[in-house]
Every structure is written in C-alpha cells, then in structure tokens.
Image (cartoon, coloured by chain):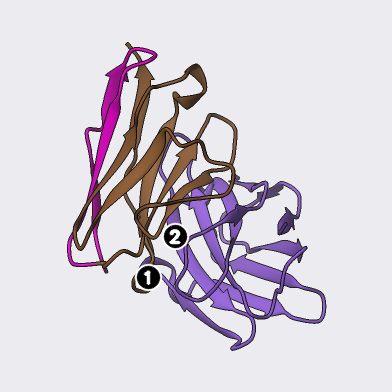
Amino acid sequence: EIMMTQSPATLSVSPGERATLSCRASQSVGSNLAWYQQKPGQAPRLLISDASTRATGIPARFSGSGSGTEFTLTISSLQSEDFAVYYCHQYNDWPFTFGPGTTVDIK
Amino acid sequence: QVQLVQSGAEVQRPGSSVKVSCKASGGTFSNSAISWVRQAPGQGLEWMGGITPVFGIANYAQKFQGRVIITADESTSTSYMEVTSLKSEDTAVYYCVHGSGQYSSLDHWGQGTLVIVSS
C-alpha cells in the first residue's frame, strides 16, 4: 500500500496571502495524484487531477505541481471561501490512498 | 454531469450488517469506476474499495477485505456497499464516488450516508 503524508497539518494564513501545501508518497505515483477540498458538513470536491490539471470550474488561483513522490498545491491568494481541509490522493495503484489532510485556517 | 444519489442514514446494532446504495445518472456507468470512501467523525478520508461495473470485479483496501462487499448493477446504474460484522468504529459518513476510469481521480461525490453503529 502506498502511504501518503501531508505537511503541514495546519496552515494559518491571512486572506490574500499565498498558501503552499505539500504531499509526499511513499513510492512513485507518477502524475496520478489528485487534490480535494472539503468544507465542514460537505462532501469533498475535486480541485486538481493528474497532479496539475484543474477540475472544471476551479479558479486559476489553485495550482498543482510535482511528480513521482513530491507534490505541491498552491493557492495564490487566499479567499475567504478557501479556508477548508485539503487532501491529496494517489490513484496510481490499488488500493487508492489519501493523505491525512492539511487544514487551512484564518490567521 | 454525473450525479450520485445515496440511500438514507442508518442506525445499526454492533454485529449486524448495513447495505448502502448509490444510484448514478448523467454519465456512462458501465465504463466508469465507483469508489467507496468513508469518513469517521472528525477524521480524514479512507478509501475502502472500488469497482469498475463493466468488469464487475471489486478491489478492496486490505483493512476491509472480507468484511466489505461492493457490487454494481449495470441495469440500474447502481452500486452497493455492504459492511458486515459492524463495530462502533464503523460509525462514519460513507461516500460513493465516481471516477472516469479504473485509475482516475474521484470527480463526482455522492451526498454521503451516515451510518451509526450503536447498541
């Protein structure tokens, strides 16, 4: 099973600032990496697939990069609606696995 | 646009079983993949298993192997996920999630089904 780790566990950011979230896989997943956003009481929402492709309707302030074992999600200028939990997910191999999540909260 | 509608909340006794349904519309069910992901209260996302309806073969996380059964009915575009021998630790929201293929991101999520296991 591929283990996913995320850092930091919590990121405190002021609105308008840039946020950088990291995800690491225990072995290479190529570019088969996705990012999801989850707000309280809601189902997760796909933000990024294939490490860097924004999903339909996702604002350009969200960007993903990386390949192999190291990945980054960047939110260029945080808006109030971006404060949430973010999960990375590898779909390179079964079983699929998720990272533990990074909480982005208001500084 | 794919839509997934899940069955309603359940309260079950320890040791019993629960079966959650997930009806898909708006896409090509047979050629897609359906994953089941759960989230315990205050915890992260946990992938349980998935199925590609056209092949009819399910894959499971080792933790759930032997206790979870995932099936798909192509005629009704519905996937089912059954958990047997329920424990209190199985209390969670269970999501069915659509992927465009066997190895793809999870692009459309059901609304979630809360399962409470309590005596």
Mark 1 and 2 residues: CB-CB less than 8 Å, in contact?
Answer: yes
Quarter of the image for the N terminus of chain A: give it: bottom left
When asked about the image quadrant of residue A32, the answer is bottom left
When asked about the image quadrant of residue B79, the answer is bottom right
Q: In the figure, the purple chain has which letter? A: B
Please give the chain letter of the residue carrying mark 1: A
Residue under label 2, please give it.
B47
Residue type highlighted by circle 2 = Trp
Residue located at (57% from left, 69% from top): B100
The answer to whether B27 is drawn above or below residue A63 in the figure is: below
Q: Is mark 1 on a helix, strand or loop?
A: loop
Does B41 sit left or right of B96 as displayed?
Answer: left
| Residue A9 on the magenta span | yes
Residue located at (52% from left, 50% from top): A55
Classify 10 Å Cα crowding around label 1: few (below 14), some (14-19), many (20 and above). some
| Part of the protein shown in magenta | A1-28
The answer to whether A26 is drawn above or below residue A35 in the figure is: below
Residue A104: x %, y % from top left: 36, 26
